[in-house]
Image (tube, helix red, strand yellow):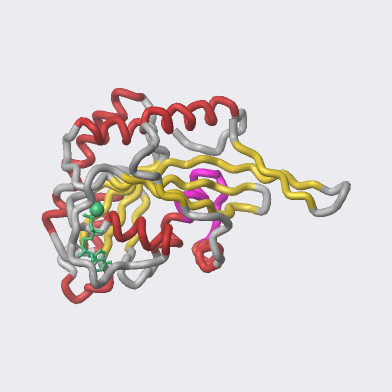
Amino acid sequence: MASKMSITFSEDEEEEIEIKQIKMIFIGDSAVGKTSIIQRFTQNRFDSEQKYKQTIGLDFFMKEVEITASLHASLQCWDIGGQTIGQKMIKSYLRGSHAIFFVYDVTDAKTFENLEKWMEFVKEVIKETGKVPYLALIGNKTDLGYQRVISIQQNQAFADQYGMRFFYVSARTGDNVHATILKVANDLCGVHTSSTDVEIQAAAPAVATIKRSPMKNRTNPEMVEAEIVHDKKAEKDDCIIF
Ligand SMILES: Nc1nc2c(ncn2[C@@H]2O[C@H](COP(=O)(O)OP(=O)(O)O)[C@@H](O)[C@H]2O)c(=O)[nH]1
Ligand SMILES: [Mg+2]
């Protein structure tokens, strides 16, 4: 069941806020900026000093955002870490996802070409589960625009082929990161917003704390998946698309 939290305004006035649990997973080659995008979104920071450090294992970060006054979304952002295409572990994470972000680096053609392989892998999961999550394409590192090797036309052709929305972001400058993730969250909740609305929403502070799954009691991915499926069944007017 969707979690509810009550806020009391006065003795006889009470408004219930519904919180939707949304699981998002970021896939793509190493070093495209998956961890940086998640960090920018959940903690609004970018480690420019940090030398490239491959994420080990799998992490998820949570951030609660306001979709409407009475509907919030608790976004679980899953980082696949250093796992490569085809690794079994990724499949189990993909299975429960409501949204899958295909991330590439606009300055590295190989990372874009490899998205076809990532897509083949995702298709296998969709075939197994019969559920089609929201698919979105992200071209990262737009701050390095002068080094861009993948044209907007190539990007658009890939997105059109798979009926995906596409976005350009820079985890480094923060450009479009919040707006992109919020747009997808809004779409998943059936709340259709203009890009201006999403920009305003993105500029507003997050409504709740950021939680990082502690290393020692990291949630079992199957459990998280089960919770979401349960949530989905419980809600008749469910806004999450499969
Ligand atoms: N210029 C630039 N560098 C970025 C951007 N996002 C990530 N990076 C750098 O790219 C490298 C890989 O980023 P990381 O988030 O670890 O990639 P991951 O392996 O996909 O998780 C790091 O050195 C980051 O500092 C960006 O938007 N612009
Ligand atoms: Mg990483």
100 relative to 81 in the view: left or right:
right
Q: Is residue 204 above or below residue 29?
A: below
On the image, the x and y values in percent for residue 183 come to: 47, 55
Q: What are the residue bounds of the magenta stretch? A: 182-194
Report the residue that reaches farthest toward the bottom: 146
On the image, the x and y values in percent for residue 227 come to: 48, 30
Q: Quadrant of residue 100?
A: top left
Quadrant in which the C terminus is drawn: top left
**Residue 161 seen anywhere in this rendered image of the structure:** no
**Residue 107 seen anywhere in this rendered image of the structure:** yes
Front residue of this view, candidates 192 and 182: 182
2 relative to 159 in the view: left or right:
right
Residue visible at 23% across and 73% down in the picture: 145
Residue visible at 59% across and 26% down in the picture: 234
Q: Let me know if residue 24 is in the magenta part.
A: no
Report the residue that reaches farthest toward the right: 12
Q: Let me know if residue 191 is in the magenta part.
A: yes
On the image, the x and y values in percent for residue 175 come to: 37, 69
Quadrant in which the N terminus is drawn: top right
Q: Is residue 113 above or below residue 45?
A: above
128 relative to 16 in the view: left or right:
left
Residue visible at 34% across and 24% down in the picture: 129
Rendering quadrant holding ligand 1: bottom left
On the image, the x and y values in percent for residue 113 come to: 14, 51
Q: Quadrant of residue 178?
A: bottom left
